[in-house]
Image: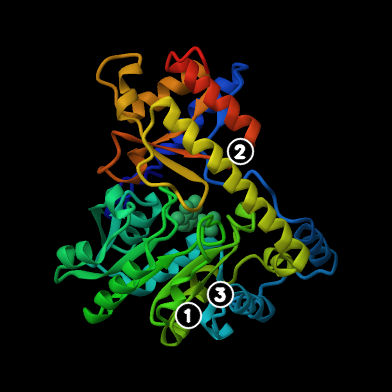
Amino acid sequence: MTFSHLASRLDNIAPFHVMELAKMAAALEQQGRHIIHMGIGEPDFTAAPLVIEAAARAMADGKMQYTSATGLPALRAAISAHYRQAFGLDIAPERIIVTAGASAALLLACAALVEKGSEVLMPDPSYPCNRHFVAAFDGQAKMIASGPDQRFQLSDETVRQHWSENTRGVLLASPSNPTGTSILHSELAKIIATVRGKGGFAIVDEIYQGLTYDGEPFSALSLADDIIVINSFSKYFNMTGWRLGWMVVPESLAAPIEKLAQNLFICPSAIAQHAALACFEPDSLALYEARKSEFKRRRDYLVPALVELGFKVPVMPDGAFYVYADCSALLKHCVKDGGDADTLVKDVLNQVGVSMVSGLDFGPYTAQHYIRLSYATSMENLQEAVRRLGLFLGKNDV
Ligand SMILES: Cc1ncc(COP(=O)(O)O)c(C=O)c1O
């Protein structure tokens, strides 16, 4: 059988460039090279012990059947209680829909709101899959160049400037991947008001919300309840492979999203849901907070170390576990003349075994001059990575 008639929407979906680099790193490891992985976007920690015990208990008790499409009532109630405890917010469990990761939540949101020709505004740089979720429903992501002066986020001004008759909404992530920078509350409030005024939708991805290091924790839900907020057990709760997340939707969207979830997924993983209930136990929360402090410690080491090496970090990342660093001044160290961030990343990997990601996946605006480094690896690895980068850059005193 030949599949020569692929749906044309596939032309608008690019492969993940990061994976190419991961393949190169794996090939070097097979040759016996030691590689420090700073390209990956997942915590080096695993789920809390109580969560693992709860998963084992759920399996032993045979709690493995389908659940309701919107998730276990107990888990929706636990997430609602978490919003009350952590942010003083009253979010009705009926507005919370448990999903197979933030990915499924983004997919459901786009399935409900995007149609052929819909334009969705998002910053460039941003998480690559976002533009592809929009493309999957025949919409078009309009990526707006957003530099360090805007904390790499949309501003109310850029939203107004770029809103066209085809624009249906905005998709933001705060803190952002790849930059680790959050949008200012005051700016977000203005954007939401503008979008509301135009009759559009606002999706705010708060997947890294638990991992914010400066200032008080904050959710966009404190600004408005007519927005869609996305979250996940992947990052703060260290459960990437368990495939569990959630979305908070306005009351009027709960039934349409439930209908889509029933058809597209039946339900999120039952075992993961039973296990995730234990995330909210005091012992688990204490562990997650300790790990968050460890991430902050790593950030506070890595950012100055990179600046010392000649990278520019124009905005201090206040969350997630990424540093988005301008490497323009270091491109002269590429093996061949005329290299860009992508060449630099490959040269560093080949020569000194540190795996990082260039801006290429995150949109064209910063692609050639920025690299993303993940500090979701041990402090020892970070110190060794800095030493190796120093060697690559010919700084013998490192
Ligand atoms: C900004 C952002 N949104 C969503 C996701 C998807 O996460 P999940 O594992 O919850 O599907 C990621 C994963 O890296 C991300 O960085």
Label 3 near label 1: C-beta < 8 Å? no
* Disc 3: which residue: 87
Image quadrant holding the N terminus, namely top left
Question: Coloured how?
Answer: rainbow
At x 28%, y 80%, the residue is 196
Kindly state the secondary structure of the residue where label 3 is placed: helix
* Disc 2: which residue: 377
Between circles 1 and 3, the one closer to the viewer is 3
Quarter of the image where one finds residue 62? bottom right
* Kind of residue indicated by mark 1: Lys
Q: Identify which residue, 66 or 35, lies in the foreground.
A: 35
Horizontal and vertical percent position of residue 129: 40, 53
Horizontal and vertical percent position of residue 194: 24, 75
Horizontal and vertical percent position of residue 269: 64, 65
Circle 2 packing at 10 Å, graded few (<14), some (14-19), many (20+), is: some
Look at the picture and state if 301 lies above or below 103.
above
Kindly state the secondary structure of the residue where label 1 is placed: helix
Between circles 2 and 1, the one closer to the viewer is 2
Horizontal and vertical percent position of residue 66: 66, 72
* Disc 1: which residue: 259
At x 69%, y 79%, the residue is 74
Q: Identify which residue, 57 or 383, lies in the foreground.
A: 383
Circle 1 packing at 10 Å, graded few (<14), some (14-19), many (20+), is: some
